[in-house]
Image (cartoon, rainbow, N blue to C red):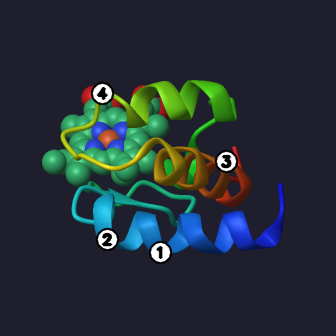
Amino acid sequence: MPNAVIAHGRSVFASACSGCHTLTGHDTRSPGGDLGVTKLSEATILSFVRVMPVRISSGDGRAVAAYVHAAARG
Ligand code: HEC
């Protein structure tokens, strides 16, 4: 995944996901849980993104799924 996509995903995460999720690698009791511990595949993360209560473009969805997958240590 190109770094530009990951970098874009990071900014999408900050604006669209960080209200409910953290990405620290340990449980933070955030409302949606910490995604840094996820073992989900990028494709599965993307399918969750599509059912999250946020409206983002499909390009932003793919970027944020790539970022979460790259950042997760699970
Ligand atoms: C309004 C709150 C909210 C927002 C915003 C939100 N989520 Fe979620 N998300 C949740 C909740 C609640 C769950 C279910 C957590 C559970 O029951 O384990 C969840 C679950 C998930 C899961 C599945 C985690 C797992 O291991 O089962 C993923 C992946 C995920 N969200 C990614 C995202 C991403 C990426 C974004 C930003 C595009 C996002 N979410 C935005 C609340 C939110």
Binning the other alpha carbons within 10 Å of mark 2 as few (below 14), some (14 to 19) or many (20 upward) gives few
The Cα atoms of the two marked residues, 4 and 2, are separated by: 17 Å
Could you tell me the amino acid type at mark 3?
His
Binning the other alpha carbons within 10 Å of mark 4 as few (below 14), some (14 to 19) or many (20 upward) gives few
Callouts 2 and 1 close, C-beta under 8 Å: yes
Answer above or below: position of 34 versus 23: above
Q: Which residue is mark 2?
A: 15
Callouts 4 and 2 close, C-beta under 8 Å: no
Residue 52 occupies which quadrant of the picture?
top left
Q: In x, y percent, where is residue 64? A: 53, 54
Q: Secondary structure at mark 4?
A: loop
Label 4 within 8 A of ligand 1 by Cβ: no
* Earlier sequence position, callout 3 versus callout 2: 2
For residue 69, the mark is 3
| Ligand 1 quadrant assignment | top left
For residue 21, the mark is none
For residue 51, the mark is 4
Q: Secondary structure at mark 3?
A: helix
In what quadrant of the picture does the C terminus appear?
top right
Could you tell me the amino acid type at mark 1?
Ser
Q: In x, y percent, where is residue 61? A: 48, 46
Could you tell me the amino acid type at mark 4?
Val
Q: In x, y percent, where is residue 11? A: 47, 75
Q: Going 37% across and 31% down the picture, which residue do you hit?
A: 50
Callouts 4 and 1 close, C-beta under 8 Å: no
Q: Which residue is mark 1?
A: 11
Could you tell me the amino acid type at mark 2?
Ser
The Cα atoms of the two marked residues, 3 and 2, are separated by: 17 Å
